[in-house]
């Protein structure tokens, strides 16, 4: 799902109001009826709204849907992307947007810059994308859910990721600085690094291994388990220590930075020990395979890590208190559990049975609105399904090497306001980017 921002510079205030009205209406309508859009947008003169609607539909930010009972519109992922970018722009979190640097299983990663030209990363969560691939349990789970719930789940992922990163960063853990979040997106510090997966060899594997294990233990002590502690989610920064400071030769120090937190879980979780052991096992196996390094002793063990845990310092409790409620955590967790390839089939089947009974009820509660119309996502948006179906989820896609020193293709989101940009020029650009004018 490509983030095409060509049209963003040319949306009028009215267009934004109408787009926001469709979003607002989507909270309790799978298909938002046109009169409701007009009412929420609160614009004077009906024809203005219709013009905005047709412009927004033309550039694919909303899509017309013919329902059995009425015609209306729904927000597309593109429309949601625009609304989030607009918010980041208004909050001065993002000034310009650059190249895509990563395609995760369920996210797209872009380089952005702040108004002061600081390099940042924009992570757009796209939950539901893998449901078109091989994960059958998950596809079944989503079958009866609306597009709205994909958006809801993606927003939960962003909200949780931001909340977790915020507390971890404050407590001195090596994670990128979280800068802001809106809807399904998180903006964070850009780490100039390589994922561990791309690091051929390390001078002292034992040292790096110990640091990573210590990170897992320290996290558990503070009530958190990463849940996907693998070579893709550990970024390796290289810091050169000058000869003079070290007394000897110039040295390169490796600093691991942890990313990717939507699946993080509390140490209170019923399966906490299993997740902890799995994170430990991931690092162990990877170091054996890639660096031929094997630790002298077993562990670390969950029980030992928990001995040092003090309830007053529990960050999982704090994340929950920050507004990421237990219900939200449960909604997201249920989805993540199904999405995991690593979980064996028997476990998935158990979990599916356990949850069977309450899925429908939860749908009705979602976002505090009325029940959404059950719809097959593939029918709901065949074009999106086609795009998603074509995505390969192989290792190569998960990590793209960063070409250091390049300019990342950063482009301001605003139209430059120099007086020499004549209205005519803007008009023709607007037309070229697909506007019906
Ligand atoms: N703050 C950052 N600085 C630099 N690169 C980053 C940053 N965040 C993410 N990346 C790059 O983007 C890739 C994907 O990011 P992330 O792991 O957060 O997404 P994901 O969708 O959860 O991926 P997956 O589901 O495949 O684990 C990372 O492996 C890394 O190469
Ligand atoms: Mg990842």
Image (cartoon, helix red, strand yellow):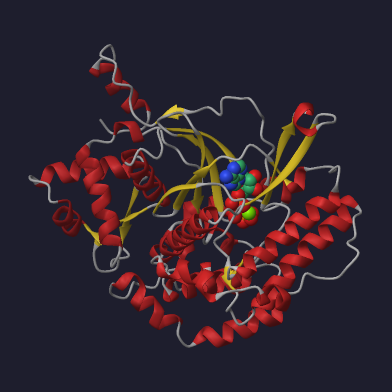
Q: Residue at x 60, y 40 (%)?
A: 191
Is 98 in front, or is 215? 215
Is residue 363 placed above or below 125 in the rendered structure?
below
Q: Nearer the viewer, residue 92 or 4?
A: 92
In the picture as drawn, the residue positioned furthest to the top comes out as 420
Residue 424 in picture, x, y percent from top left: 25, 17
* Whether residue 410 is visible: yes
**Which quadrant of the rendered structure holds the C terminus?**
top left
User: Residue 220: x and y, percent?
Assistant: 64, 69
- Residue 351 placement, left or right of 434: right
Q: Horizontal placement of 371 versus 46: left or right?
A: right
Question: In the orientation shown, which residue stands out farthest toward the left?
Answer: 45
Query: In percent of the image, x 32 and y 75: which residue is there?
Result: 371
- Residue 383 higher or lower than 380, as above or below: above
x, y (%) of residue 140?
55, 74
Q: Which residue is depicted at the point 67% across and 40% down?
A: 400
Is 80 located above or below residue 270 in the figure? above
In the image, 108: left or right of 342? Answer: left
**In this view of the protein, can residue 229 be seen by the observer?**
no
Residue drawn at 30 percent across, 73 percent down: 368
Looking at the picture, tell me which residue is in the foreground, 113 or 214.
214
């Amino acid at each position: 799902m490509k983030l095409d921002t060509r049209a963003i510079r040319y949306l009028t205030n009215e267009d934004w109001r109408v787009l926001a009205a469709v979003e607002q209406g989507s909270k309790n309508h799978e298909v938002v009826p046109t009169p409701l859009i007009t009412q929420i947008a609160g614009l004077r003169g009906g024809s203005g709204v219709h013009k905005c609607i047709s412009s927004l539909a033309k550039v694919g930010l909303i899509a017309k849907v013919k329902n059995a009972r009425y015609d209306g519109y729904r927000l597309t992922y593109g429309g949601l992307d625009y609304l989030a970018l607009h918010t980041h722009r208004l909050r001065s979190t993002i000034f310009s947007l650059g190249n895509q640097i990563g395609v995760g299983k369920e996210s797209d990663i872009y380089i952005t810059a702040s108004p002061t030209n600081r390099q940042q990363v924009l992570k757009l969560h796209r939950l539901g994308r893998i449901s078109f691939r091989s994960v059958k349990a998950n596809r079944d789970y989503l079958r009866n859910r609306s597009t709205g719930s994909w958006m809801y789940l993606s927003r939960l992922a962003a909200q949780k990721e931001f909340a977790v990163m915020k507390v971890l960063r404050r407590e001195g853990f090596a994670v990128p600085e979280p800068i802001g979040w809106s809807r399904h997106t998180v903006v964070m510090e850009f780490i100039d690094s390589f994922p561990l997966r791309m690091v051929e060899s390390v001078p002292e594997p034992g040292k790096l291994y110990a640091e990573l294990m210590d990170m897992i233990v320290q996290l558990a002590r503070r009530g958190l388990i990463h849940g996907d502690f693998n070579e893709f989610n550990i970024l390796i920064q290289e810091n050169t220590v000058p000869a003079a400071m070290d007394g000897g030769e110039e040295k390169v120090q490796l600093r691991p930075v942890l990313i990717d937190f939507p699946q993080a879980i509390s140490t209170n979780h019923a399966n906490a020990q299993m997740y902890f052991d799995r994170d430990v096992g991931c690092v162990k196996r990877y170091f054996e395979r890639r660096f031929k390094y094997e630790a002298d002793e077993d562990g670390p063990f969950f029980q030992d890590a928990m001995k040092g845990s003090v309830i007053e310092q529990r960050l999982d409790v704090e994340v929950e208190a920050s507004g990421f409620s237990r219900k939200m955590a449960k909604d997201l967790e249920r989805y993540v559990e199904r999405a995991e390839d690593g979980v064996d089939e028997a476990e998935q089947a158990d979990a599916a049975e356990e949850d069977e009974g309450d899925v429908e009820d939860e749908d009705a509660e979602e976002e505090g609105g009325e029940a959404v119309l059950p719809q097959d996502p593939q029918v709901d948006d065949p074009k999106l399904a086609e795009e998603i179906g074509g995505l390969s989820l192989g290792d190569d896609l998960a990590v793209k090497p960063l070409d250091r020193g390049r300019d990342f293709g950063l482009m301001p989101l605003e139209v430059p306001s120099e007086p020499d940009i004549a209205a005519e020029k803007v008009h023709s650009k607007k037309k070229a980017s697909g506007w019906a004018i």
